[in-house]
Each structure stands twice: as structure tokens, then as C-alpha cells.
Image (cartoon, helix red, strand yellow):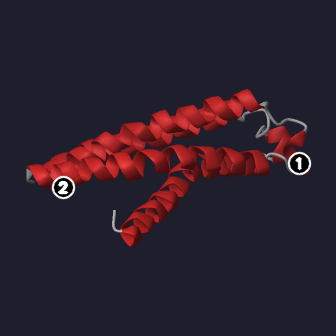
Amino acid sequence: MTVAAVDDLSRILLVVAVPAAILGAVAAGVIKRFVLSRPRYVAHRPGLRTFVWVGLADLVAWGVLWPALLAVRIQGLGSGRALWTVALLLVVALGYLANRSGFGRALDPKVVGSLRGTLVAELFTVLMPVVAVVIGLAIYLLLAALGV
């Protein structure tokens, strides 16, 4: 990979990925708050501080994956596959633990049933990166359309 390609990749990371991750965490927090505002969860819904620290934990967790993906991109797919796989597993585990511990009272089996609470925690785990990818794609397409 050439120096120019690495510069382009770092520019995309700075201009697209970082804002998309931050906006994705905020949007995921709003969606989580909306879901936990339903009558089934509202009596056990945590305060705003919990939503903030879980959002920061999501940012940290998924922030681990970006350098791994960047290393795979720069060094080639074969050299970093194990690193990427381990990073992805750790990220999913950390995101699940953050969401389950942060929203544990609201997702307690006595409140929603054991399977439903687990599924909602898993949805919350993948919500931030999915929203961030959609926002990142929108930012990238907007910048491409503007010619930036």
C-alpha cells in the first residue's frame, strides 16, 4: 500500500468514521431510550447517566475494532485475519457486557422474560455499529456528491 493510499485511508477515518461512530452512539442511545420507554420497561429504566456511560462503553468497545480493521487493510487481509477475528469477538463481548450490566434491571427476566431480555441486550449490542455504518455511508456519499 502506498503512502498516498494510507493518507486517503486516514482522511476517511478522520472525516467519516469518527463522526459516524460518535453520531451512531448518540443515535443508538436515543433508540435505546425509546425502547426502554415502553410500558414494559419504564418502571425499571435506568437514568440518563447509565445511557451516557453505556454509549461511551460502546464507543470504546467499537474503537478497538477500528485499528484492527485498519491494520488488516494496510497489511493485507491474510496477515491480520486472526487479529480482526479476536478484536471482533472481544468487541461483541464487551458491548454485550456493557449493555447487559447498564440495562440489567430493565432487562431482568422477572420484568421481560429471560429470552426477551437477552435478545434486547443483543440488539443493543449491535445497534451502535449498525447505526454508525449507516451514518458513515451517508456522510461518505454526501462528501462524494459534494466532491470533497
Residue ID at (79%, 46%)? 36
Nearer the observer, 56 or 97: 56
What label does residue 85 carry, if any?
none
In the visual, does 94 lie left or right of 12?
Answer: right
Label 1 sits on a secondary structure element that is helix
In the visual, does 63 lie left or right of 29?
Answer: left
Report, in whole angstroms, how far the alpha carbon at label 1 lies from the one at label 2: 45 Å
Q: Can residue 81 be seen in this view?
A: no
Mark 1: which amino acid? Answer: Arg
Q: Earlier in the sequence, mark 1 or mark 2?
A: 1
Quadrant for the N terminus in the image: bottom left
In the visual, does 102 lie left or right of 94?
Answer: right
Which residue in the protein does label 2 denote? 77
Question: Residue 20 location, x and y as percent?
Answer: 48, 51
* Number of residues whose C-alpha sits closer than 10 Å to that of mark 2, classed few (under 14), some (14–19) or many (20 or more): few
Which residue in the protein does label 1 denote? 40
Question: Residue 37 location, x and y as percent?
Answer: 84, 47
Label 2 sits on a secondary structure element that is helix
Q: Can residue 104 be seen in this view?
A: yes
Mark 2: which amino acid? Answer: Leu
Q: Is residue 40 above or below residue 57?
A: below
Quadrant for the C terminus in the image: bottom left
Residue ID at (52%, 43%)? 22
Nearer the observer, 148 or 62: 148
Q: Are marks 1 and 2 in contact (CB under 8 Å)?
A: no
